[in-house]
Image (spheres, coloured by chain):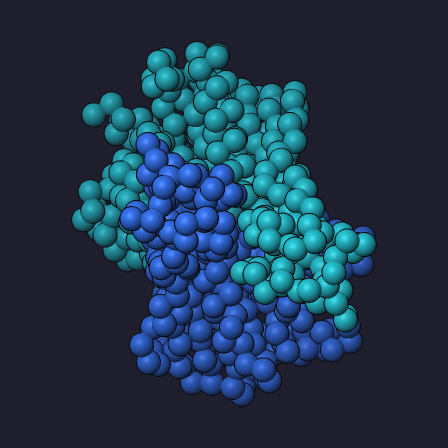
């Protein structure tokens, strides 16, 4: 690892989707003023590139896992593959004709191994691609998962590894990572080993519910965590309640961001919120400052 | 009829649309919350839990060390790196395991058996005409699709079911959308909403499921989503006006059709349009 240990990585997640992760990430990228590498780990539905209109300098295909394909001319139609498959991916089309649904196949290889006539091929799967791009805020690593493809967790890990490599090479101290919603595989892949997680939530019953689950996850991986409530004035009481619950589990409160239609205006202009004259830009600057202060303590 | 409510982008209003549709339906309807990572529908229904939560498990390997000679057949077979051999001992990493059963079958010594590993629960709640079935993934578990399949196993053979899908476009979404009759894609009129809608459209087209689009918070952004739908010949099912009062009601756990009666008509019309569109396919 060596010098790599000095690189900090801030991962922005949310639990619930659509709370404003990407808008906050984009503003942080601007505020980092060229000192950070950006990583868009929401590989399912990546949006950060819409703010930064990146110029791609490298595109690398992402191959991961395999898929089973039955060769009709060799298949005896015994149906063992359909019996053994735990994912319901093998279907019987008609009398003794079997087919693997590539969307349902999880690439375990059981059918391939146990087919008595060796009729099943195991082909490498192209699951998407990842890119390194130049943006006005520095280099960005991002990705595109193939349509109905799997292994988004692995693709997330690839994006993070590349961002770390670039930060090391360029001597940059920080990686800012835009994470996916939820608490499953891609989220776990986004946060393990990060220096800090910022959870952007909203003052709603869903925001609160999902925040508590994601905080448990962060604690499970022992990652220092901060919370910021976006659109806090939609429900000030709920904001108080959420912050109290976060404090109770020793989570830093990084600040509040007001409800601001200008966030959408910024998006339409392909700008970060702090790049336009928006009331909430001031709030985002405060959150950024608080996070940095939290780091220094 | 099985109708899934999905979107590429998170927070566009999937759960809102699913709940309000289920509420205006008028007669018994099943709502299945397939967003097992973050199930939210129950927060708005205050339903009564019916019976004990059903524990969902995944079969994972257990090694009988008295039979295992550390040959490594299991670990070299495993596509998910859930097994490793170290100094002739097999280590199992349950969180990596997909439960395919391959290791057990390839072990020449018969040293592997499967034990159930808990991944989450499926709960059934009653709230008036709505029966809510929700999956809840245990925190720290990576694999959502097996739990989603357990939720979908509760779809009745007759009648209507509404599925609230997770955000995104990968495995959990595919597991939810497979074998549904119609998909309602919810988006918002912003560049992020449009970008993620296009990704979601590619997925439902790949799965060959008929679909239509609902623009939520219409008026808060621009008109590019509507223009895209026109160009692509995609049925625009409804535009739900942007209204801060809806956001405030939502924040308190109230449904739009309950807090703001003028929304009843919008959702009734949406339900009729979806039914008509789905039947016409």
* Residue beneath the point at 40% across and 69% down: B122
Residue A41 place in picture, x, y as percent: 50, 37
Q: State whether residue A57 is above or below residue B115.
A: above
* Residue beneath the point at 37% across and 39% down: B70
Tell whether A154 sits left or right of A199: right
Residue B193 place in picture, x, y as percent: 61, 49
Quarter holding the N terminus of chain B is bottom right
* Residue beneath the point at 27% across and 43% down: A219
The letter of the blue chain is B
Q: Quadrant of residue A95?
A: bottom right
Near-viewer residue (A293 or A100) = A100
Near-viewer residue (B8 or B66) = B66
Q: State whether residue A141 is above or below residue B238.
A: above
* Residue beneath the point at 31% across and 26% down: A292
Tell whether B63 sits left or right of B255: left
Q: In the figure, what tint was chain A given?
A: cyan
């Amino acid at each position: 690892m060596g010098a790599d240990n000095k690189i900090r990585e801030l991962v922005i997640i949310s639990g619930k989707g659509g709370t404003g992760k990407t808008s906050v990430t984009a503003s942080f990228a601007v505020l980092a003023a060229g000192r950070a590498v950006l990583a868009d780990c929401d590989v399912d539905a990546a949006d950060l590139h819409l703010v930064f209109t990146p110029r791609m300098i490298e595109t690398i295909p992402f191959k991961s896992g395999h898929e089973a394909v039955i060769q009709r001319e060799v298949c005896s139609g015994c149906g063992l593959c359909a019996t053994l498959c735990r994912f319901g991916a093998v279907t019987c089309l008609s009398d003794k004709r079997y087919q693997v649904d590539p969307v349902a196949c999880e690439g375990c290889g059981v059918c391939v191994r146990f087919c008595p006539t060796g009729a099943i091929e195991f082909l490498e799967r192209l699951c998407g691609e990842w890119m390194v791009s130049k943006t006005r805020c520095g280099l960005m690593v991002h990705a595109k998962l193939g349509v109905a493809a799997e292994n988004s967790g692995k693709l997330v890990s690839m994006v993070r590894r590349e961002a770390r490599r670039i930060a090391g090479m360029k001597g940059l101290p920080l990686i800012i990572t835009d994470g996916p919603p939820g608490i499953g595989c891609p989220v776990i892949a986004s946060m393990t080993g990060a220096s800090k997680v910022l959870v952007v939530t909203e003052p709603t019953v869903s925001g609160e519910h999902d925040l508590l689950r994601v905080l448990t996850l962060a604690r499970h991986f022992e990652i220092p965590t901060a919370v910021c409530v976006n659109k806090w004035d939609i429900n000030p009481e709920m904001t108080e309640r959420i912050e109290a619950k976060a404090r109770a589990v020793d989570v830093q409160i990084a600040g509040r961001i007001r409800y601001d239609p200008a966030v959408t205006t910024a998006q339409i202009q392909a700008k970060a919120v702090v790049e336009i004259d928006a009331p909430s830009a001031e709030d985002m600057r405060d959150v950024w400052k608080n996070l940095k202060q939290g780091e220094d303590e | 009829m099985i109708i899934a409510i999905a979107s590429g982008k998170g927070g566009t209003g999937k759960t809102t649309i699913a709940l309000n549709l289920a509420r205006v339906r008028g007669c018994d309807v099943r709502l299945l919350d397939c967003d097992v990572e973050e199930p939210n529908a129950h927060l708005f229904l205050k339903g009564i839990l019916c019976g004990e939560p059903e524990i969902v498990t995944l079969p994972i390997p257990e090694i009988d060390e008295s039979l295992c000679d550390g040959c490594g057949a299991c670990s070299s077979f495993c596509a998910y790196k859930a097994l490793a051999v170290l100094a002739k001992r097999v280590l199992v990493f349950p969180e990596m395991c997909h439960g395919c059963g391959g290791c057990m079958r390839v072990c020449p010594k018969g040293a592997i058996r499967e034990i159930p590993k808990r991944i989450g629960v499926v709960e059934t709640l009653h709230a008036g005409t709505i029966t809510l079935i929700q999956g809840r993934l245990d925190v720290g578990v990576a694999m959502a699709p097996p739990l989603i399949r357990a939720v979908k196993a509760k779809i009745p053979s007759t009648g209507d079911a509404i599925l609230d899908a997770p955000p995104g476009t990968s495995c959990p979404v595919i597991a939810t959308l497979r074998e549904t009759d119609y998909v309602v894609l919810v988006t918002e009129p912003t560049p992020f909403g449009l970008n993620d809608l296009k990704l979601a459209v590619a997925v439902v087209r790949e799965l060959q499921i008929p679909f239509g689009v609902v623009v939520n918070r219409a008026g808060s952004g621009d008109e590019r989503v509507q223009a895209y739908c026109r160009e692509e010949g995609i049925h625009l099912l409804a535009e739900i006006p942007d209204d801060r009062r809806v956001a405030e009601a939502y924040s308190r756990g109230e449904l739009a059709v309950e807090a703001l009666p003028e929304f009843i008509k919008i959702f009734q019309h949406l339900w009729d349009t979806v039914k008509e569109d789905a039947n016409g396919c």
